Image (cartoon, rainbow, N blue to C red):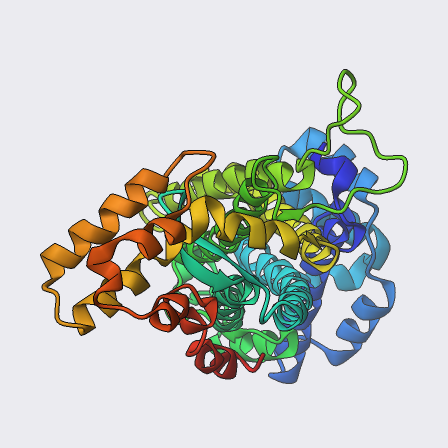
Amino acid sequence: MIERYTLPEMGNLWNEAYKLQTWLQVEIAVCEAQAQLGYIPSEAVAEIKAKANFDPQRVLEIEAEVRHDMIAFLTNVNEYVGEAGRYIHLGLTSSDVLDTALALQLVASLDLLLQCLEDLIQAIRHKAREHRYTVMIGRSHGIHAEPMTFGFKLAGWLAEVLRHQERLRILRGTIAVGKISGAVGTYANIEPRVEAIACQKLGLKPDTASTQVISRDIHADYVQQLALVAASIERFAVEIRNLQKTDVLEVEEFFAKGQKGSSAMPHKRNPIRSERLTGMARLVRSHAGAALENVALWHERDISHSSVERVVLPDACILTHFMLHEITDLVTNLLVYPQNMERNLNCYGGVVFSQRVLLTLINKGLNREEAYAIVQQSAHKAWNKPEGNFRDLINKDPRVTEKLSPTEIDACFDPQQHLRHLDQVYQRLGI
């Protein structure tokens, strides 16, 4: 299913041909650095750049025999280059190329995710602006709490996504790290100057102190950040699912013409895209755990991390990319039902305005315990009864009416009292 829904631009960053292309980029950058420092002939580098190529299928054929992916790749490249190929991979170890090239893939993937994140930011911002004054009930523990607006709910989503944007921008600098330091990272057969020049050409910075590999805390950080993005998307998806319940129905996923909800029940309009996102978030989170397990390698390196990363890094990037596209489309086309929000807000005669009545009675001189008992009594009489009407009960309670005028009682049931400071939040977010 994941392959079917993969968006091609991210998938292309993780196919075999692109991976080998990044390997070749690194090898050529190192050759250019070596030539710049006078260690290999510049004419040889020109020939390498002109002739270097690879055939993914041929690489696999060679690897089947030699059982080493980098040797298979270099053998195939040298079949194209010829004599000048002896200068390729000079003084390097496999992880110099593998880890530096992997950084190029991760940076390219992150740039694409940042573009998608910006699209989501704009979609949420637009929808929050549209429903800035659409009053609805807020809920805690799943129970009606106090009035708010749908735009304010979306403002919380926007703030969360903006934090992700900042985290991913920082992460881009963290992950853009290469290493050209040879076996166990000691520069025994290659100079640090070569590393510095090659990394600069590739848009990376040298790792501060690599072993034979770049330490995997960096990669674990990368996957954890994607897992955090996925967790937020799941939060939004779960909210949509809850608000789409038949007995709530305040929002609904867009239902296309000709779409079917159930093979058995023609009436069904299910939140299937939000449910899909919920499931995908579980996968991305599981990859974060695997990435953390990769941090502890033996001594200067082993390759236990390699098999894990072949799965979790492309999968986490592809999943997160799809999820961002999906939630952006969901938010953009979300159906919002203000009339249902108003209906739910006034359930049981506006019982959700109980705190306003409580505070107004306290301001009129009642102690908190006495005022709480009066208001709770009317609220519980109205709660969960078809005919229950909290407002009517309050209006008929002499303990209330001797303290509050009809105008003051009416003011307690005005939802605008709950919204008067929300502009400050909108201003912080530029909505």
In terms of image quadrants, where is residue 405? Answer: bottom left
58 relative to 279 in the view: left or right:
right
The residue closer to the viewer here, 280 or 190, is 280
Asked if residue 96 shows in the view, the reply is yes
What residue appears at the point 41 percent right and 42 percent down from the top-left corner?
Answer: 142
The residue closer to the viewer here, 273 or 33, is 273
The residue closer to the viewer here, 235 or 181, is 235
**Can you give x and y, in whole percent of width and height, for residue 182 in the image?**
48, 61
In the picture, which quadrant includes the C terminus?
Answer: bottom right
- Vertically, is 324 above or below 383? below
- Vertically, is 203 above or below 399? below
Asked if residue 179 shows in the view, the reply is no
What residue appears at the point 75 percent right and 60 percent down from the top-left corner?
Answer: 85
**Can you give x and y, in whole percent of width and height, for residue 135 in the image?**
54, 63
**Can you give x and y, in whole percent of width and height, for residue 63 in the image?**
70, 35
- Vertically, is 273 above or below 34? above
